[in-house]
Amino acid sequence: MPSAPAAARADHAPWRSLKYRSMRWWSLANLVSNAGTWMQLTVQNLLVLQITGSAAATGLSLSVQAAPGLLVSVAGGAAVDRWPRKLTAAVSQALLGAVAFATALLVAFDQLNLGVLLALAAVTGLIATIDGPACSLLGNDLVRPEDVPSAIGVGSLVSNAGRLAGAGLAGLAVGVFGTAAAYAANGLSFLFVAAVIPFLRPVAAAVTRAAPAAPGAPADDMSVREGLAFFARRPRLVALAGISGISAIFGRNYGLTLAVLVTGPLAGGAGAFGTVSTVLAVGGIVGAVLGARLRKPSVRLVGTLAAAGALLQVVAGLSPSLAVLLVLVLPMAVVESVSDTAGTTVLQTDPPAHMRGRVLGVWNTIRTMWSLAGPPALGLLMELAGARGALVAGGLLIAGAIGAGHLLRRRRTPEPVLIRPETAAVPALSTAA
């Protein structure tokens, strides 16, 4: 029998989700899928440029693919709540594979034009509104609730590994077989995931399909409107959305702010920013491992980490040299990654099982708005205050908003009334005979 310290270490081990056989298969499937996705993404922008010769068209294709996430994510989440999860994930993966194969054929026969490409991007985005929450929740179903942070952390590591592998394989595949090969490889990766899903076995505690409505419950209990209302009534989720939103807009866009800082005030070049990017990636991996050790993260933890990252961002904005910046970048990335794992865990486990698809749908809509609003807002801030000013002002805004929200919550939460034993009411004794 394992000792108590050994059992405690096992309970917090970052890899504990891999003790489930189905989770091991799911992680392998996701590694293959992520590699295929990054193979396609690596060549997609180049393909658009080859077809149109326009950078604006490249941006348009990305916007068209993101548009369904803004408009119909809540409906996609409602579908995930209504339909059997394994079947939904398998069908959505197969459909994404079909789109990738169709694109590969059109590229191979030189039949892909801008109109067809935009239509395929829109279809991909539409399918993703269902596929995203279905696959996320299916992965959580494969482990017990206390091991969900580990599953999310392992998923983050798998995503990073798939990204590195996909970028390398893309160059090899395109060099040997042509651009269509990247799309064909992505199609095969989707089919591999679809083939693995039927053999996955959720744990006994997992709920893989919507629970039936209770007797007397309203008929629209599974509706999109109910999902929106639930999210709005849940203070934890609203607070999480606020923390993540302000962090996404005024922080975290380090590919933009740090690039301008390194190549501008710090007088570095592309190589210097490449070093910064590498440190950010390493910090993200370390943070994913640490985040996977969590068991029951809270919104307060997410807020604390976000505020800490914002203060580090302020100091980074004042860095006098590249060496100082590199020292700060690592903990910035670690804190961000742990915060992401904690926030995702709260998001996917706080709602009741029959509401989780719609909650993720609402979240995807909010996240899409951040991704569209963040870069222009940050770019404007840099135009007004420069790279250093944007980092400092953005960090102070994030930390200040989180601190103000915490204070406001404490003021609104009534303190418990303590009754001293000597002043407590004593029941009167009956004098009846």
Image: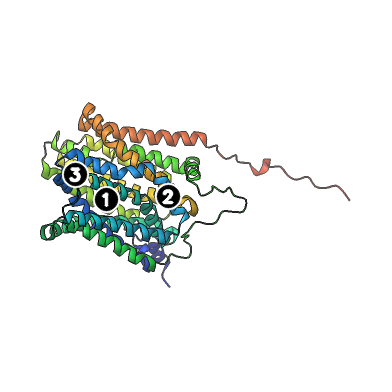
Is 345 left or right of 221, judged from the image as shown? left
Q: Up-down: is 45 above or below 180?
A: above
Point out which mark residue 98 bears.
none
Under circle 1, the secondary element is: helix
The three-letter amino acid code for the residue at tag 1 is: Gly
Q: Which residue is mark 3?
A: 326
Instruction: Tell me which corner region of the image, top left, top right, bottom left or bottom right, holds residue 271.
Output: top left
Residue at x 44% of width, y 61% of height: 144
Horizontal placement of 159 versus 8: left or right? left
Residue 197 in sight = yes
Q: If you read the primary sequence from the N terminus, does the residue marked by circle 3 or circle 1 appear first?
A: 1
Q: Are marks 3 and 1 in contact (CB under 8 Å)?
A: no
Q: Earlier in the sequence, mark 3 or mark 2?
A: 2
Could you tell me if the residues under marks 3 and 2 are in contact, i.e. CB atoms within 8 Å?
no
Q: Nearer the viewer, residue 152 or 60?
A: 60
Q: Which mark is residue 77?
A: 2
Residue 329, how many percent across, how many down? 23, 44
Amino acid type at mark 2: Gly
Q: Residues within 10 Å of mark 2 (few under 14, many from 20)?
A: many
The amino acid sitting under disc 3 is: Leu
**Residue 289 in the image, given as x and y percentages of width and height:** 31, 56
Q: Position of residue 122 (x, y in %)?
A: 30, 46
Query: Which of the marked residues, 1 or 2, is nearer the chain's N terminus?
Result: 2
Q: Which residue is rendered at x = 41% and y = 61% of the image? A: 87
- Residue at disc 3, secondary structure: helix
Image x and y of residue 244, in percent: 36, 41
- Nearer to the camera, 270 or 315: 270
Q: Nearer the viewer, mark 3 or mark 1?
A: 1
Q: Is residue 369 left or right of residue 272?
A: right
Residue of label 1:
284
> Residue at the top extreme?
384
In the image, is residue 290 above or below residue 71? below
